[in-house]
Structures are given as C-alpha cells and as structure tokens.
Image (cartoon, grey):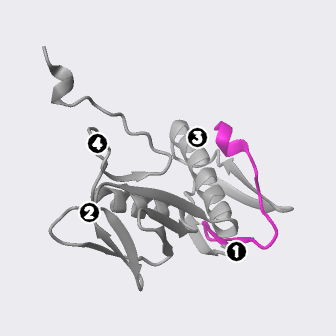
C-alpha cells in the first residue's frame, strides 16, 4: 500500500467535499475545484475525513493501483489546501533596467529585449506586483499557479554569470566564474 495514500485528509471548516460518479468536488472560500478519480481507487467521506482505498476487484495491476492510491490522495489534498488557504509563488526580477508592472489584468515586463513582454492573467490566477522587481502569483489550483510561474520565469531565466533574469525567491543560482577566472 502507498504510505501517502493511507493517510486520511481532514476537511477544514468552511470546505465541502462531495463525490459524484468518481469525481471529487471540493468547494471552499478561495474557489471550487474538481478531480476525476480512477475506478481502481475507492473514495469515502466519513466524519470530516476523506479516505482513499484500493479496489481489490479492479482489473488494473497492483503496482498501478498503488501509484494511483498515492497520486489521487495527493491531488485531492492539494485541492483541499488550495480552496482553504490557497497557493502562491514569488518571483524576483534581477538585472539593470529589468522591471515589472501590472496594467489592468496584464503583467508588463521590461527584460532587456527591444520590446515589452506582456502576459495576461489566466482564470483562477491573480498577479500582484508589490515592487518593480517582485512578482507574486496567487491561486487555489496548485498546478495552475506553478505552471503560470514557470511560464513567467521562462521569459528570461536566470543566467549563471551575473544572475540576471527572473528567478523564484527561494531559488539559489549557482554562479560561474567568467573568462577572467580561467586565466593560465
């Protein structure tokens, strides 16, 4: 059995979890999310806990069932945390002349190109720009928040020589010595 899958998910107050035809719906103060669960996994909602069990009669092989057991438990747990607390990713913009601003629902970035890079907020995501070199991305869906943050970072990834570019706040950039460090 999966160690992760065996753990029950406690449902915080203000969050409702419902199960309809293999689809788990989670509704809370920050939003509403749903996830289809494979038929080889049984989902039970008992006294403020969501419990996942492997269906022994399913035709799927046992290793696959174990993998699904932990996977769907983790996905539903992320949904419960997302609708109750939410997720956020913080990005830093480093470089001379590099800055960001928010205009309406668009993120406008000056990243050393001859043009501005503009990205629109997607549904379920909110962008904050507390300073000219800081971006904060909020949302209830962990996957959407992470994907959008990765797409923003992709516009100018940090380079190893001077550290210029967009990086996650907690990311450490391994620096390299330049050509002057390679003299004989």
Sequence-first disc among 2 and 1: 1
Say the numbered circle drawn on residue 28.
1
Say the numbered circle drawn on residue 183.
none
**Region of the chain picked out in magenta, as a range:** 1-26
Where is residue 119? Give x, y as percent.
Answer: 32, 74
Label 1 near label 3: C-beta < 8 Å?
no
174 drawn magenta: no
Please, what secondary structure does the residue beneath circle 1 have?
Answer: strand
Residue at label 2? Answer: 111
Q: Disc 4 and disc 2: Cα gap in Å?
A: 14 Å
Judge whether 62 appears above or below 41 on screen: above
Sequence-first disc among 3 and 4: 3
Q: Residue at x 14, y 68 (%)?
A: 114
| Between marks 4 and 1 in the image, the one whose residue lies nearer the viewer | 4
Sequence-first disc among 4 and 1: 1
Judge whether 89 appears above or below 6 on screen: below
Q: Which quadrant, please, contains the N terminus?
A: top right
Q: Disc 2 and disc 3: Cα gap in Å?
A: 45 Å
Sequence-first disc among 4 and 2: 2
Where is residue 67? Give x, y as percent.
Answer: 54, 42
Say the numbered circle drawn on residue 66.
3
Label 1 near label 2: C-beta < 8 Å?
no
Where is residue 24? Give x, y as percent.
Answer: 63, 67
| Between marks 2 and 1 in the image, the one whose residue lies nearer the viewer | 2
Q: Residues within 10 Å of mark 3 (few under 14, many from 20)?
A: some
| Between marks 2 and 3 in the image, the one whose residue lies nearer the viewer | 2
Residue at label 4? Answer: 162
């Amino acid at each position: 059995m999966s160690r992760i899958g065996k753990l029950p998910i406690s449902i915080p107050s203000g969050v409702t979890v419902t199960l309809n035809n293999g689809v788990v719906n989670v509704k809370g103060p920050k939003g509403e999310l749903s996830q289809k669960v494979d038929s080889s996994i049984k989902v039970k909602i008992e006294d403020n806990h969501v419990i996942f069990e492997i269906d022994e009669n399913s035709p799927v092989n046992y290793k696959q069932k174990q993998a699904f057991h932990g996977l769907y438990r983790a996905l539903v747990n992320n949904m419960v945390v997302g609708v109750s607390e939410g997720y956020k990713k913080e990005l830093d913009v480093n470089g001379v002349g590099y800055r960001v601003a928010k205009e309406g629902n668009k993120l406008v970035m000056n990243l050393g190109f001859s043009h501005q890079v503009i990205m629109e907020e997607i549904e379920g995501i909110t962008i904050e720009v507390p300073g000219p070199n800081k971006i904060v991305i909020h949302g209830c869906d962990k996957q959407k928040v992470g994907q959008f943050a990765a797409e923003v970072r992709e516009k100018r990834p940090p380079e190893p020589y001077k550290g210029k570019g967009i990086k996650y706040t907690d990311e450490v950039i391994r620096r390299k010595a330049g050509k002057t460090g390679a003299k004989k």
